[in-house]
Every structure is written in structure tokens, then in C-alpha cells.
Image: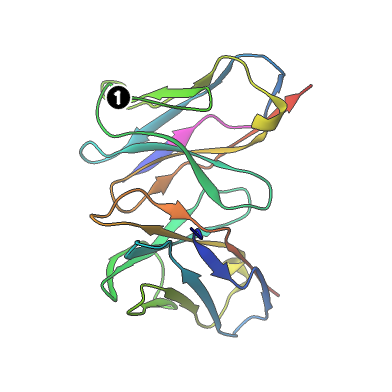
Amino acid sequence: DAGVTQSPTHLIKTRGQQVTLRCSPKSGHDTVSWYQQALGQGPQFIFQYYEEEERQRGNFPDRFSGHQFPNYSSELNVNALLLGDSALYLCASSPPPPGEQFFGPGTRLTVL
Amino acid sequence: GDSVTQMEGPVTLSEEAFLTINCTYTATGYPSLFWYVQYPGEGLQLLLKATKADDKGSNKGFEATYRKETTSFHLEKGSVQVSDSAVYFCSFGNEKLTFGTGTRLTIIP
């Protein structure tokens, strides 16, 4: 059984650009959460998707948006990139009702 | 607001030493509590969890007890190994997880 997968593994962008990160949840999981982990810090909750809708949102600006597809996979979009957006972006999936969160390996985003 | 305070690192111990990493939290209600571990270049792995007061989570020799009175969830292991070297995160939540800043643990042979 494949775990949570994320793509790409690494990404380099310049300020002002836009980026899309992708996540495929574990089989049987219907809820996807996204976290940002800055270097040397703990993960910070960005938002959570369930039934193709944003269910909860953390303290992140509107530049951060997401989407969940009918197959439960998800995308994280960040517009107008800032240097401070450089971080490891983690996706976590959970089964109903929702249960425990399983994390993917992350996407390392570097903004130059 | 919701927050987690955990022991700052880095922590360096000799193999077979006793480990304690302190964690306290501020939260509304009685959320589930977790310890996650992150190995270099990898995502987070759930190490153990506790879902209600006085529950003890355990895994791979690690233990932590949900203390409602002191809002704490300290991680302990009786005899650490070199392979335990990693960053450990204390966390809580029922859907949205709130994390501490992490404690880097290095075990010396």
C-alpha cells in the first residue's frame, strides 16, 4: 500500500512567481491537510480539504489556496511568492471520520 | 491561543542513556496528543499518541502519558540507541495539528 506521495520533491522559484504542489493521499483516506515547515521550526497548519472543500484554514494569507479532486488528491497553490515562503511543504492524509494523519515526505520549495 | 512548548535542543546523549523531552501545551478542550519523529530529509512519522487523560502512548521503547492536570505530555525512553537520532515534535489536535518547534536529539555511540 503506497503511502502519501508528494510531487515534486524539490522546487526552485523566484519572487513573484506562482507554484503548484501536488499530493496523493493513502488509499482509503478522504481528508488532506497541508502544512508549512520553515527551517528549524515545527510544521504550521495551512488548510484542510474534505469532500473537495476547504474545511479549516490556518493563519495564512489568501496567496495560499488549494484544491481537492474527486479522487481525493490535492494541490496547494501559492501566488506572488515571497522569500519567506521558502520551506518544506508537507501533505498529510487521514481516513474517515477523520482519523490519524499520515504525512508525506514533503516538497522543498526555495524562493530566490 | 493554542500552542506547544517543548524542550529546546539540541540534546546529545550517550547510547543507553535515559531520555526525557518535556512538552507542555495550551489548548481548548481535551485534544489528542502526539509525538512525531522526523529523520533527516524525510517527512513526519507518528511515534505515539494518547487520546484522553491518563492514557499512555508507547512505541519502540518510547512512552508518554497524557497529563491533563499539568497539560503535559513528556516523552521518555529508558535506553536510547544511535538510531534514535532525529528531530522530535510534540503536537496536539483533533483535526488541525499544532506542533512545537522540535527537539533535535543526537545519540553518541
Q: Can you see residue B10?
A: no
The type of residue carrying mark 1 is: Asp
Residue placed furthest toward the left: B29
Residue B85 in percent (x, y) is at 67, 33
Residue A4 in percent (x, y) is at 49, 61
Quarter of the image with the C terminus of chain B is top right
Image height of A18 relative to A57, above or below: below
- Occupied quadrant, residue A47: bottom left
- Occupied quadrant, residue B31: top left
Please give left or right for residue A49 compared with residue A82 in the image. left
Residue located 60% across and 85% down the image? A17
- Read off the residue under disc 1: B55
- Check residue A57 for magenta coloring: no
- Label count reads 1
Residue located 49% across and 52% down the image? A43
Name the one closer to the observer, A5 or B97.
Answer: A5
Please give left or right for residue A97 compared with residue A46 in the image. left
Residue A81 in percent (x, y) is at 57, 78
Image height of A62 relative to A87, above or below: below
Dot 1 lies on which element? Answer: loop
Q: Can you see residue B39?
A: yes
Please give left or right for residue B29 compared with residue B83 in the image. left
Badge 1 sits on which subunit?
Answer: B
The span picked out in magenta is B5-9
Residue B47 in percent (x, y) is at 48, 36
Image height of B58 relative to B104, above or below: above
Name the one closer to the observer, A21 or B104.
Answer: A21
Q: Examine the residues drawn in magenta and state their main secondary structure.
A: loop
